[in-house]
Image (cartoon, rainbow, N blue to C red):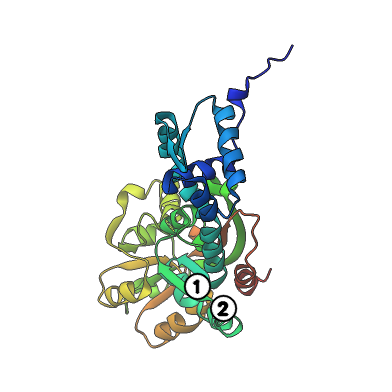
Amino acid sequence: MSEKHSPAFKEPRMEQFRALIHIARHGSFVNAGDAAGMARSSIWRQIRALERDTGSKLIEVQGRKVRLTPDGALLAEIVEPMIEDFEKVIPEFSRRKDEAHRTLRIAAPPQVLAHELPHALGEMRRRHPDVRIIITSVTSGTAIEQLVQDEADVALVGHMDRLSDEAGKLHIVPMTTFPIVALLPPDHPLIKKKRLTLRDLVSEPLLLPPQRSSSRPQIDAVFSRHGLLSELNVTLEANVFNVVLPYVALGFGTAILGASRNYMEGELKNMAKRGEIGLSDVSHLFGDEKVFFLTRRTRVRQPHIDELRRLLCGR
């Protein structure tokens, strides 16, 4: 047999709370009705219904004046900030919706920003001149964090174990792959060797990507599987080519980095031809670095985000 609830447990309606707040602010049914855009009789009915629903006397009428009882004042103190917050919902929704349609926040590592994004973003600006594009250069790990925390709309990141941890929250689309290359100082004896080995590399001072990058765990895992991780002599951690290349040219060490195919086939090969560096594809040792286009899982589709995905991923 189901238990019957007393009227005191009936859930009040928002209109009743609004009527109470207007009575508290204006001190009469007439003034409260004018402020709420309701007839005096409607304000009266809402207050009486609220008294029935709460089982408490909330107002006292003294001629044309109306004041709250202690219970009424307590209830008004509780619900007034809630009503104010509720009344902000539609304006805030409109503001965020408008902002979402006009803003595209992208977080990605420097290499992706430098060598994969420019053409696509140029096309986006041509097609959507009203969309404000904000770009942040971060590691892959930080890009994922910004996406999950709604600080970015799109993250372009390398393959990471973290992706499996966040897979339920993210929509993941393969974007491209970066071969892992070795950059050697000019005139280094290994430049003439067609196929480098792990032992060749571990015998040199190394310039590697930072730990929070996508490629560093991949590189370390290969050395670890072959019992060579403890032999690494890492002299610089960076994954920005403009930072790494001067140190390679100075003979500071051999760099191992994932490289955009556009950059490898263009600038890096030209530098190698000019004798400024040695360039060797070592993806036979470390594999390729996979790059993904990430967005949060949501039912709200943003056409400009879908279009950027098609430009970068072909789907």
Q: Residue at x 43, y 55 (%)?
A: 141
Rendered-image quadrant of the C terminus: bottom right
Rendered-image quadrant of the N terminus: top right
Element marked by disc 1: loop
| Amino acid type assigned to the residue bearing label 1 in the image | Ser
- Which residue in the protein does label 2 denote? 120
Pick out the residue farthest to the bottom. Answer: 274
| Discs 1/2, front | 2
Q: Nearer the viewer, residue 79 or 306?
A: 79
Q: Nearer the viewer, residue 234 or 67?
A: 67
Pick out the residue farthest to the right. Answer: 1
Q: Residue at x 42, y 47 (%)?
A: 25
Q: Is residue 182 visible?
A: yes
Position of 67 relative to 26 (above/below): above
Q: Residues within 10 Å of mark 2 (few under 14, many from 20)?
A: some
Element marked by disc 2: helix
Res. 188 image quadrant = bottom left
Q: Give left or right: position of 240 versus 131.
A: left
Q: Nearer the viewer, residue 151 or 69?
A: 69
What x and y, as percent, mark residue 158?
Answer: 50, 60
What x and y, as percent, mark residue 77?
Answer: 40, 38
What x and y, as percent, mark residue 216?
Answer: 41, 56
Q: Residue at x 41, y 70 (%)?
A: 110
Q: Is residue 161 visible?
A: no
Pick out the residue farthest to the front. Answer: 63
- Which residue in the protein does label 1 denote? 260
Q: Nearer the viewer, residue 244 or 56?
A: 56
Q: Residue at x 43, y 45 (%)?
A: 27
Position of 169 relative to 262 (above/below): above
| Amino acid type assigned to the residue bearing label 2 in the image | Ala
What x and y, as percent, mark residue 69?
Answer: 42, 31
